[in-house]
Image (cartoon, grey):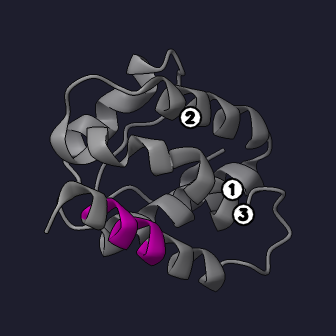
Amino acid sequence: MAVGAKVLVVVVLIAMVADVFRKTESAVTCQLVVSSLTPCTSFLIKGGRVPKACCNGVKSLYKDANTATDRQMACRCMEQAALMLPGINIDYASDLPGKCDVNIPYEISPVFNCSTVQ
């Protein structure tokens, strides 16, 4: 499968996850998470240079997720997307905030509990 086709499949899968979390009290939705982080797909799978659009999305999402509820929702959306997107390298995912000059107060991990995000 070509890289472009893989990215399209990823976007469709993430959009399906977004539908699951549509009803929420949070200002952050899975659709916002998807649109913010879609430019990061290539980096999360293959590493290399982080696209500027990816860092712009990471910074925008970080700014938008300004309450514990928002941050927990963003975490859950990313968690669900990661389950549906095979090939994400956890080391690349862990490196992404720092590469985009965003400091998050927790470690990205496959066993992270989103309800602990403050």
Which residue is painted at 53% across and 82% down in the image? 16
**To which residue does mark 1 refer?**
32
The quadrant in which the C terminus is found is: top right
Residue 115 among those drawn in magenta: no
Give the number of the disc on residue 58: 2
Residue 107, given in percent of the width and then of the height, sits at 38, 37
Mark positioned earlier in the residue sequence (2 or 3)? 3
Quick check: marks 2 and 3 in contact, CB under 8 Å? no
- Closest to the observer: 94 or 34? 34
- Magenta segment, which residues? 6-13
What residue type is disc 2 on?
Val
Rendering quarter of residue 81: bottom left
Rendering quarter of residue 110: bottom left
For mark 3, does the 10 Å Cα neighbourhood hold few (<14), some (14 to 19), or many (20 or more) residues? many
Residue 3, given in percent of the width and then of the height, sits at 21, 56
Q: Is residue 105 visible?
A: no
Quick check: marks 3 and 1 in contact, CB under 8 Å? yes
The CA span between labels 2 and 1 is 11 Å
**To which residue does mark 3 refer?**
29
Q: Secondary structure at mark 1?
A: helix
Relative to 53, 93 lies left or right: left
